[in-house]
Amino acid sequence: MNLENLCKQVNILAKEVGVYIKSQKIVVADVETKSKNSLVTFVDKTAEAKLVAQLSELIPEAGFIAEEGTSDKIGEVYNWIIDPLDGTTNFIHGVPCYCISIGLKRNNELVLGVIYEINLDELFYAWEGSKAYLNGKEISVTSTPTLEDSLIATGFPYYDYEKQDEYMNLFKDLMRNSRGLRRLGSAAVDLAYVACGRFDAFYEYSLHPWDVAAGAFIVQQAGGKVCDFKGENDYLFGKEIITCNPHIQQELLAKVKLHFK
Ligand code: IPD
Ligand code: CA
Ligand code: CA
């Protein structure tokens, strides 16, 4: 399989679906609640249906892990991991930060990632063996040597409060020992921003594979590190992710381990 060509096709598709999402207006009656603070609209579902239909043509044997459950097909080798609209709460409230996130897994390995940030028309992508790119230009993570000089993104717990105290203690620690913290409301955009060096790091718990698959892959192709809260590799299905430039990984991981015992 030629992953570079495939990535080009996925890029075109992400932009097409992005145009659809941008053209849609939401009213209050369009908002459904899946579970506490987990919102969805017809736009999320329609976007996912469009992605699944087109991606099925690109690799007919591939399966899907897709947030809105459009397809339950499991691929023996290839599986697309899709969030058709990451940042749905922003989208509903008219806050211009949301994206489409498409990852591809071959067996247990991520081999392609595409994130399209719709409002800024920014396409982040990479494929196995490639560099990482933003709108055709090579990108890389920062080389900031210390947490003290780092700008760090995170996502606040909004339905799973079990580790809220641990989260807040880490947050307080980083607030005093970094350049600052940001919460954009789209984990995939957070990851893309680590890949292109806008953020030095990002961490969050209770994320799903579709939130992180594409972004975790792009960050690594951009020279960054990705791990779970133990410093291990279970970040795709393990619901905990830390990602950053290589220089600050041990310092950040030590802080996460200190508070999440
Ligand atoms: C959410 C966003 C948000 C993160 C949540 C995700 P959704 O995805 O990525 O930044 O904090 O954990 O669920 O629901 O907008 O696709
Ligand atoms: Ca998401
Ligand atoms: Ca979503």
Image (cartoon, grey):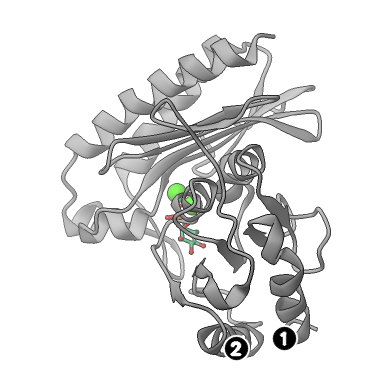
Give the secondary structure at mark 2: helix
SS class, disc 1: helix
**Image coordinates for residue 21, horizontal then vertical, percent:** 27, 37
Image spot of residue 122 (x, y percent)? 35, 37
Residue 218 quadrant:
top right
149 or 194: nearer the viewer = 149
Give the residue number, with chain letter if any, for mark 1: 259
* Whether residue 239 is visible: no
Q: Is residue 63 above or below residue 198?
A: above
Quadrant of the frame with the N terminus:
top right
In the image, 233 versus 27, the foreground residue is: 233
Please state the horizontal and vertical placement of residue 167, each as a whole percent of the image. 61, 82
Residue assigned mark 2: 173
The three-letter code of the residue at mark 2 reads Asp
Residue drawn 61% across the image and 74% down it = 147
Which kind of residue does numbered mark 1 sit on? Answer: His
